[in-house]
Image (spheres, grey):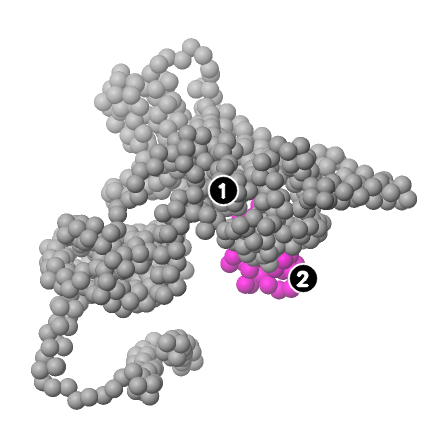
Amino acid sequence: MKAFSAIQIGGRILTLVLIILLVHAPDDAPLIIAIQGTVSLVAGFVSVWLLHRDGILIWSRPSARDIFEEIKEGSAIFLSTTAIGIYVNLTPVILGFLAGPVAVGQFALADRIRQAAQSVLQPVSTALFPRISRLVASDPRSAAPLLKISGIGLVVISTGITGALWVLAPQFVVLIGGQQFAAAAEVLRWLAFLPVVMSFSTFLGLQILLPNKRTKAFNTILVSGGILSLVIIAPLIKTFGPEGAAMTLLIVEGFVSLSMVIYVLKTGYFRGIGIRASRPHRPDPARRPCRLSFSLFSGSGAAGLRSGRAGPHRPVLLRRPVRIVGGGAAGPDGRPDFHPPADRGGAPVAAHPSRARAGGEPPERSAARTAAGAALHLSPRLHRQHSAHAASVRGADSRRARARDRRAMAPLAPSTQNISQLAYLAISVMTTLTASVGLRSARVRAVVPRAILAGCLVTVGTGLLDYASNFVPLDVVLDAFRTATLCASGGRRGSGRAAGRRPDAGSVCLRQHLRRASGAAVFRTPRLSGLRSDAPSLAARLRRLAVFAIMSSSSAAYVGLGVFLASVGLEWIWRVMRFDQTR
Amino acid sequence: MNAIRVEALIGLLALAAIAALFLLQPALIDRIAFILDDLLVSKTTSSSFEERNMWTRTAWEAFVSSWGLGIGVGSSRASNFWVALASNTGLLGVVLYGGFVLACYVRRRPKRDGQAAALLTAGRWALLPGFAIGILIGTSPDFGSLTGMTMGVMLAAGRSRYETSPAVIESDRSDHSTEQSEISIA
């Protein structure tokens, strides 16, 4: 297996090298095809020769009946491939016919970016498909855990890809296609949903329907998708241009995935092999705050991301301005009014002075303010270029005034700062949830100390690398990985704010307290079952903390160190006083 | 001699050594006092302190002027985690996050699972330095992956006040062992 992997990887690298060395101009396009074809051919010959040499592939002359049987068995795949080709390959052709080459260029670029991002999933499917096929055929129940893992993995990874593509669409498009392709960002945002939608069809189609010989249903769904594509593609392209083509793909892939989900659920396949949709409910009221927080957090984020720039030609779905409607009446005077940061000398947001008065406020104004507050809370950032208004549409206002209010409403759009902070917060929230759910098993929890150590070492390493960039020209490599930690110091060199110092300190604190709580003495290894200590002693940890404190110019590091020592001392006293039962 | 007595002895010896060092080298006291003064006490006159103070003040104003609703994640920066949280997510966010932290702290130690009890206790203590640093220099409402993981571990290891069964679920163990074997084969 290693040899074949090496051949595959070597072939890809060789292709890349040859293209870089030999292709210099647009006229060299045929050369690219020749390079790719030749390298693939050579890799194929070498692989076949290796199979033959190891006795895995033994040549025997096939009979006509064998050939017929093989073609008959494989025809199902050919049919599905043809059906997929209808809505995948024909889309740019029809787009070019109806909307012209510029639209095709935009669509092609966006689709290339989507395919490149989605190719991350390819190795997973390629690696798992043969094994799942064998297990499903021989022992479906033993395939269940692997199906579960691969299904969840595919959906989770593709959701990440979708999120990244949607959020970073403008940057990707400009980076790869240049400023002239900026309009393709909107196309990419439609296509961005494909990875997560297609993950369902990939999982259900390739890992369940085909291995279970449900090729008829598989083909029926795909052919139906192809027909649906032919029906809707023309009107959508005529109306929306290249975005219409992207919408077509999304609708068809959504139809295919949904059909497969319905088919598999109706046939009761998962129940048959012992996969339950969910675990039995175990009431745990203490987790309610966690669920509530997460729901509110994700809801706020989604509401913020849904908003975007609106324009006369962009009235659809995702670009519709967020509009919060209050229950009471409010005229222009009663409408809460918020001003952009530029008008406030950079300060984020403030209520209009005339509305800042407290006391004696009529109820309808409170209602309008509540609506404005909801808008403020649900949107990561209200202000980009314009003021934002939260207005009531019912009440004493005239129809004309309400229409004016609607026109005056400005779109709510997140800035890159909102998105990046939301991403960081999302990582932390997800980490918390993952740890709280995934570490319920004692066996899994046993790896926690080692995981913390690994994270600690990586953080120390990156921190040292960052510090080393003051003396060695590492910025070319490191700039791509720098985060807001460094931005907080204004990007200055020599500021001593090494990235990752705080997490490392946290890791050290956790490890120390873990040793202590697990019954270990200061300089001894814990003997508690399942908790292995492979970290240095307290003295070594203190040395490491001291090094980072010296590197830091922040007094907070010293305070943190002091609190850490104090907590160690307090914990020790606590244990001496025999308050702690774990000792 | 049990571990606690050994530790007590080591602690006393360390204190004695430090006291002896200060007695033999009195200049050390001045030097350390100077460093502490420079880094902690005189800090309030530094430009960094003023700048960070301004962030916190502005963020707090944003919180107040938005009627306690906050102005959205990433819309303001402070030098105090709780102020940043308040200005970004509003009073609601502060209450929910505070409630979540509290929920982590009030988890009960499982009596028959020493490992889980150790993790819960470790988490309770280990979060304190992070909270202290956050109050001083926390710029955003992001509490960080490590804090999140620690709180997640506490939730997983501890038992709810309303829960009667141990946190360790035997079925999870068996599920996990099956999954592990499948992963390794795949």
- Is A481 included in the stretch rendered in magenta? yes
Circle 2: is it few (<14), some (14-19), or many (20+) Cα within 10 Å?
A: few
Q: Residue at the location (48% across, 49% down)?
A: A445
> Is residue B49 visible in the rendered structure shown here?
no
Q: Which residues are magenta?
A: A462-488
Q: Residue at the location (39% across, 31% down)?
A: A285
- Helix, strand, or loop for circle 1? loop
Q: x%, y% of residue A578?
A: 64, 33
Give, as a three-letter code, the residue at label 2. Phe
Badge nearest the viewer, 1 or 2: 1
- Helix, strand, or loop for circle 2? loop
Give me the chain letter of mark 1.
B
Q: x%, y% of residue A69?
A: 11, 77
Circle 1: is it few (<14), some (14-19), or many (20+) Cα within 10 Å?
A: some
Q: Is residue A440 above or below residue A455?
A: above
Q: Looking at the figure, which quarter contains the N terminus of chain A?
A: bottom left
Closer to us: B2 or B125: B2
Identify the residue position indicated by label 2 in the image: A471
Give, as a three-letter code, the residue at label 1. Asp
Question: Which corner quadrant of the image does residue A294 belong to?
Answer: top left
Q: Are marks 1 and 2 in contact (CB under 8 Å)?
A: no
The prevailing secondary structure element of the residues shown in magenta is: helix
Q: Residue at the location (40% across, 13% down)?
A: A361
Q: Which mark is residue B113?
A: 1
Q: Residue at the location (50% across, 37% down)?
A: B111
Q: Looking at the figure, which quarter contains the C terminus of chain A?
A: top right
Q: Is residue A305 above or below residue A197?
A: above
Q: Is residue A561 above or below residue B89?
A: below
Q: Residue furthest right?
A: B24
Q: Which mark is residue B48?
A: none
